[in-house]
Every structure is written in C-alpha cells, then in structure tokens.
Amino acid sequence: MAQKALIQKPNLFLAFVQQQGALLAFVALLIFGALRYEGFFAVYNFAELLRYNSMFGLVALGMTFVIMTGGIDLSVGSVAALTSVLAAQLSPHGLWIALFLPVLAGMVLGFVNGLLIAKLKILPFIATLAALLAARGLAFLAANNQSVSVATDTGFTDFGQGNILGVPTPALLMFAAFLIGVLVLRFSSFGRHVLAIGGNEEASRLMGLSVDQIKIGVYTLSGALAGLAGVILASEFGAGQPTEGSGWELAAIASVVVGGTLLTGGKGSVGTTLVGVLLLGLIFNVLNFENGYGLISLSSYWQSVIRGGFLLVVVILQTRLTKGQKI
Amino acid sequence: MRSELLLEMRDITKTFPGVRALTNASLRVGSGEVHALIGQNGAGKSTLIKILTGAYRRDSGSVVFAGASVDFRSPQAAQIGGVSTIYQEVNLVLYRSVAENIFMGREPKRFGLIDWKRMNQEAKVLLERFNIFIDVTQPLGSYNIAIQQMTAIARAVSVKAKLVVMDEPTSSLDDAEVEVLFDVIRQLKASGVSVIFVSHRLDELYAVCDFVTIMRDGQTVLESPIKDIGKLELVAKMLNRDLSDVQSSGQTGFTARTRNASDGALRLEASDLQRGRALRGVSLSIHEGEIVGLAGLLGSGRTETARALFGADQLSSGQVAFDGRQKQFKTPGDAIQAGIGLCSEDRKLEGIIPYLSVRENLTLALLPQLAKNGVVDRARQAEIVNRFITRMGIKTAGADQPIRELSGGNQQKVLLARWMCLNPKLLILDEPTRGVDVGAKAEIQSLIQELAMDGLSVLMISSELEELFEGSDRVVVLRDGQSVATLTHDQISQESIMQAMAHGATINAGTGVNLESAL
C-alpha cells in the first residue's frame, strides 16, 4: 500500500511570490527609488535608513516569535519608551549600566506578561494592553513628564550614533539579532516548539511540550528586545523620550504580517520579518525623497495612509495567490 | 495463560462538578497483551484513559505500572514513564512537517542544534515500517487524515513505550490501513509492548485483541479473555441487558400504541447512502406520522446518516426522495426549506446559544419569517413563543430568561419548539433525551409521540433500547455504516435490536427478525 501525498505540486512562482512577496515589493521599490531620485542609492541614505529602522527591527523580531505562538504583544512601544528614559537616566553612571539595566527592565516586564498569559490564562491582548498602559505611565513618572537628556561623556551616544566598519552600530546589532533569530527558529527545540504551540496548543501539550515555559519565553524575549530598542532610541537621539514609541506595536505587527507570518500563529519566518521592516521603512524613505523633489508634498499622515495601503496589497497578494493551496 | 501484569488500575474514582465519572473502576493489562476497552458513551472509558495518561488526576484509587505505583501528573510525565497515547482526533500540528510531528519534544540533536537530516531519515524509516512512503519534510496538513493518523501512531510507537493507548485509532482509516495498523499492533505485541485498544467495531476487537474490559456507568463490569465471550453477550453487557430479560416495558414516556407503520404516505425514502467509510450503504424510509428509530452502536453511522439526510454532509452516492421527489440537499438550508429539522446530539455545541433568552433561542430559525423589512414583529414573536412554552410544557421563569439557566430537559424542549414552529414535515432527533433527567425525559418522549400523532414524521436516533423499543413504529439498525435490519411491528424487541447490532445480517438467530441483505 504505497501512500501518495495529496499535495499537488505547488506552482513554484506563486509559492515564491507568496513567501517572498515583501522581498519582491522591497526590490521593486529599491529600483524605483534608484532610478527616480538622486542621492537615493547612496551609502549615507541606506546607512541612516538602517540606523533608524533598527529599533523597529528589534521590536518586530520579538513580535515575530510572540505571534508565532498565536499571541500578541501590544506593550513593546511603551516598554521602549520606558527603557529609553531609564537608559538616559542611567547614562551618567557608565556605558554598560546604561546599556544593560534597561534591557533587563524590559525583560522583567515581558516576563510578567508571560506569567500572566501562561499561568493566569489572561488573553495576550488584555495582558499586554495592561502592560502598554502601565509602562507608558511609568515612563512619564520616571521622566517627570519631559524628555531626559543623556550624559555625553560616557560614550553612550556613540552606541546609537556610531559605526563599525562603516555600518551603523544599531543596524549591526539588528542584523546579528535576526541571524540568531533565524538559527533559533530553525535549529533549536525552543524555536520549533514556538511554531508547534501556535499551530495547535492542545496537541503540543499532549505531546509533552513545556507550553507554559515557552510562552513565558517569547514574551520575555519580546520585552528584552523592546528594552534594547529603547536604549537605541535614547542613544541615537540623545534623550530618553517618554512620548515616543506609540504605534510601534502596530508597525511591528504590520512588518510581521507583511513578512508572511500567520497572525494566528503556527507558521512564519524570521528572515521575512526583517524584509517587512525594511520595506515599511523604505516606503517612508521614498516618500521623503518624493517630497524633496518638490512636485508634491505629502504630509506624514499621508505616508501612514500609503503604508497601510502597501500592507493590504502585500497581504492580499499573499493570500489570493495561494488560494486553494491548503497549507 | 496470561502473562504478568504490566498495568493494574484499582478502585479508581473520579468526580467532576456534579457528575461522578468513575466509581471504583479497574483495568488490568498484561505485558505484551492487546486489551480491548469498550463501553457506551459516558461509560467512563475516556476518563479512565485520561487518568492513566496524566491528562486528569484521580480522586482515589491506585495505579501500578511496570511494578511501581505511579501517579502521572501530565501527559509529559506519562510519556517519560512509558505510556504513549494516540488520541481519537489527530492531535498533531498540521503546519509542521511529518518528521517534526513524530519527533517533536525529543528532536535528535547534533552540537546542540536540531539534526534535520537524521530526523527526516529516521522518520522516513519509521513510516516505511508501516508501508507508508511519503515525503516526510512536507507539512502534515498536506496529507489525508489516514496518513495523519499513521503519523500519530508512528510517534507513539517510536517513543519506545511499554504501553500504547489507542483511543479509536481506526475511525478515520480504510480497510487496508486498518490492516496495516493491525500489523503494527502485532509487531508491538511481539516485542513485548502492551496495547490498550478502544474501538466500537466489534469485528476489529475480535481480530486483534486478547482481553476485553467492559465499562458501564463509570464502573468496570467485566474483564475476560475475548475468545470466551460472544458478540451478543458483549453488547448485552455494554448496554446492561440481561439476555433472558428482554420483555420489560413501561420504562419510558411512550405509551403503548398500536404500531401502525407505513399506512401513511411515504415521506422520505433513502436508498444506499454512501459517504467515505462512515456510511457504506444506508437505506431507510419514513412515512407520514411515523416514528422510525435508528439503532446502532457508537460509530455505526447514526449521526452521519442524520447529517447526510439534512444536507450537512455531502453524499458520495445514494438517493434521497422526499415527498415523492428526488432531492439532493446541498446545505441544511435546503433541507429546512423542504421541511426537515435536525436536533443535534450535542445540545451545548450545536443547539443552544446560552446567553440568549428562551424567546430568541426558540425563534432563531423562524426569524426570517417574523421580520418585516428587517424588523422583527415582536407581537407575533411573543405570541408564538408563549404558545410553544405552553404546548411543550417548558418550565421557565419567562420568555426572557437566558436559556443557560434552564435545565437540560427544558433546553431540549426549547430546541424542539424551535423546529416545531417552522411546521416541519420531518424531524430528525439525535439522542433527544440524553443528559435529561428522568421526569423531563418522559415528558419529551410523550411530546414526540403527540407530534407524530399530528402527522409529523420522526427519525429518532437513540442509544437507549427502551426508547427505541417503546417509542418506534419501526427500527432501522445500523452496523458499520450499513443498515443491516429493519424491524417492524412485533419484531421489535430489545433482543432483536441487540442481535442486529452485534451480528448484523450474518446470523438470523430465529428471532423472527426480518434481516435485509447487508450488501
């Protein structure tokens, strides 16, 4: 009795578009920008693009793991705001203290989120919404309702503003984090179990996976990465900013979804989230150039509308093209 | 001669809020033995198995496994302890590859990283042992249910368990696949592994099992070598019927009535309904004002027949004529339009909407007719609701009481009323009195009878022999997806029903049963 797979040979082109839709859009936009704008295809432009988007990249990386378990983390933006304030306040006390303690704070907040979700069975949406509100409040309290300048003599700002081998330090950090993320997802039990839990939580439990620990793990990871994003924020702009970070969670979710990760969990990729982040960043960049061209002038509100449109188009492309293919 | 015991569960008691699921239940399995565990729905098999596999904790009792007293706290602990389980519904992750599903939680590693090459290779070899040659790197969800089930079995076998529990593993397999599974079971047995095999297919039990334990009402009622007990006796034990005592009556709300089958016009005639392995040739007919009972063990295709007649599942072949016209209901909506109603078995899941009121629940299906320009005619609605509350004897504080506050029996009456206010010609009732207390049960039964007197045709699925025996004008008996007997008039007895359930058409034991040819 030879069993045959029921799967029909997928159309390779469609499969590629589905998996790499964000990459195609990214490349297309890159070519468009290079042809149309002077100074677009320049080292400086790309370096600054990467420097600025590294914060979103880190947040989106954590979000990818959370979403792959079928959860959501709404607190990332507030956590980043809080840790940017903490980093600014700690910056006079030494570089390493200012770098690590805020990340630790983000980790603790994420860990609490994870505990609430895994042990008390609070819905991720609710638990992290509460954390969003609480962290925002703490950020304002800690900052005394104003932005907090960082110390300039401890080298703290070099971290966000400097380069290593010509590449912005935060961008290097982001690339390294994504590389580790890809490896963890592919080659560690943790990564595979994250996907298993998102695919079928009850089955995972019955298979004997440590569902609770893994859930706590992804929220802790997300908190830590949001904390790191806050440190970069303070370092790059020279101030802790309690008002920053609002809407980051949505931008991160958008990047994850554009990258092709299922919002219901169970299926996704880390690498394509990075492409999603860069795509959304590039749209912003192109619009800035278009404004600089002087023909039209789009306010940042319009930019948001256009990003929303792009998000929809990419997702519709991904889902329509693969209609009929079951998995 | 029985080998030494691998598992001994004794005096297991488990109570859920309001329900006593197990009372001093026991289960003993020898090593290298294939042990059948059978019982009706609610007999406590699943609870007992879940206690063994760590999904539930017992209230009292002892479990000795491989010579040591154990108390598994989680499925994980049970797996480590050597008990591996295959659940009835495939409990795997469809998005992940076949190989991953087999090795999830114990992935082969190299330098701390998952060794994909080895994992895929081992999964391939494992499945080839079961005669399955597939690409194990593809997502599990891209394969059919049978392969998914075999993957679950491969997973359970590969953990090197001492005991493999299979909870209805064959329900989604075809005959050839069942044979492969039996080969696997024999391989396991030969290597000293014990198997607990839950199935409702009697032939399968006799084909592969050594011992059988029968459960009923949360208790173990019999343990025996399977060759020492006949099929009829097995069924009788399961249903709690004494073979010699089959003429008791007056236990239900159905009053003795002259069975006047088939003098009304023919309402529905179904012939040779087929759908996969669940329905393999079901034929039945229902006349106007007739109550036809649908009997059969679990998994014999009763609910599937109901769903197919109602258009909820599509048939692969077969004919349905309704009121003399050939019909093919594509959706339940079509069937409702034609005048068919279905009260499903699972009230909570498929019937009531708990937070809505009695009024809203009762008129849910009628709303399109009650609405004018999208606005519900409240006065007419109230009139209908009140009429049915009175007629059905629904005990409620008022039409606006949320239905979840009503007793099971009254919820069931509301569901009956939901269909009755549509004026159906045929009502299909799947276990209409399950989970209903005794008083309400009798009320519902006499209500069904009254409705039939008024000309309603009823197809009544029931696991209770009294209900079938006393309530039906005719009884159609299903076995393994086939209608094997139609009993009319004085042919209907508890024994004749049991005979047909157990043996189908293969034995006509001189009971006067008119057994149709099975094929």
Image (spheres, rainbow, N blue to C red):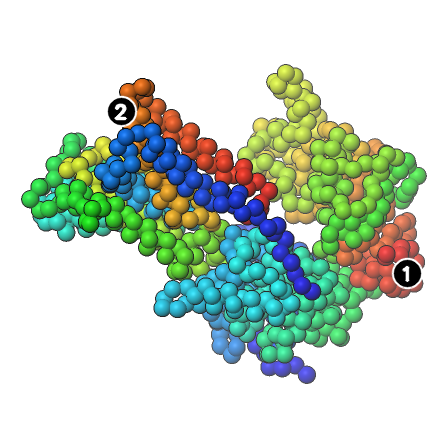
- Placement of B403 over or under A223, stated as above or below: above
- For the N terminus of chain B, give its image quadrant: bottom right
Q: Which mark is residue B484?
A: none
**What type is the residue that disc 2 sits on?**
Gly
Secondary-structure class at tag 2? helix
- Placement of B236 over or under A62, stated as above or below: below
Task: Report the residue at 88% width, 35% height from top.
Answer: B324
Q: Which mark is residue A292?
A: 2
In this orientation, which residue lies closer to the viewer: A303 or B156? A303
Task: Report the residue at 37% width, 43% height from top.
Answer: A275
Q: Chain of mark 2?
A: A
| B331 to the left or right of B21 | right
Task: Report the residue at 47% width, 54% height from top.
Answer: A196
Secondary-structure class at tag 1? loop
- Viewer can see residue A146: yes
Labels 1, 2: one chain: no
Q: Which mark is residue B511?
A: 1
Farthest residue to the left: give it.
Answer: A153
**What type is the residue that disc 1 sits on?**
Thr
Crowd band around label 2 with a 10 angstrom C-alpha radius: few (<14), some (14–19), many (20+): few
In this orientation, which residue lies closer to the viewer: A280 or B342? A280
Indicate the position of residue B431 as horizontal and vertical percent values. Answer: 71, 47
